[in-house]
């Protein structure tokens, strides 16, 4: 693994995908967010240069990318690896975490 690429994408969910209101304690674990565009889910992924996935996390569609990035990066060894991401992953916290991993 010379390069790891990190990014996310939003996936539209069916209007009935969130289930019934107050559908029990697991209702908040369905990772479906509501916005003006409807129900959405976001896939945050860490892949190698050829696009093969290493790990991914599902969140609500309205969740920001940078807080989830640290959770993804903690799952792999970053020693000797170049991490490629867009501007959203350029925060000082994320860059310091990658630098401290070597």
Image (cartoon, grey):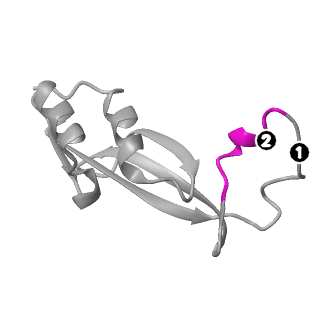
Quadrant occupied by the C terminus: top left
Which residue has dot 1 on it? Answer: 22
Label 1 and label 2: CA atoms lie apart by: 7 Å
The residue most toward the front is 92
- Answer whether residue 53 is visible to the viewer in this image: no
Above or below: residue 77 compared with residue 26? above
- Answer whether residue 26 is visible to the viewer in this image: yes
Above or below: residue 36 compared with residue 47? below
Q: Position of residue 56 (x, y in %)?
A: 45, 41
Which residue has dot 2 on it? Answer: 27
Q: Are marks 1 and 2 in contact (CB under 8 Å)?
A: yes
Image: magenta residue range: 25-33
65 and 6: which is toward the camera = 65
Q: Position of residue 67 (x, y in %)?
A: 39, 42
Quadrant in the rendering for residue 4: top left
Quadrant occupied by the N terminus: top left
Q: Is residue 32 magenta?
A: yes
């Amino acid at each position: 693994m010379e390069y790891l690429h990190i990014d996310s994408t939003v996936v539209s969910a069916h209007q009935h995908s969130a289930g019934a209101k107050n559908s029990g304690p697991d209702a908040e674990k369905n990772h479906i967010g509501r916005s003006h565009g409807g129900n959405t889910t976001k896939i945050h992924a860490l892949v190698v240069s050829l696009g093969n996935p290493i790990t991914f996390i599902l969140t609500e569609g309205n969740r920001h990318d940078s807080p989830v990035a640290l959770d993804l990066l903690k799952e792999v060894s970053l020693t000797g690896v170049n991490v490629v991401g867009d501007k959203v992953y350029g925060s000082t916290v994320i860059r310091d975490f990658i630098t401290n991993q070597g």
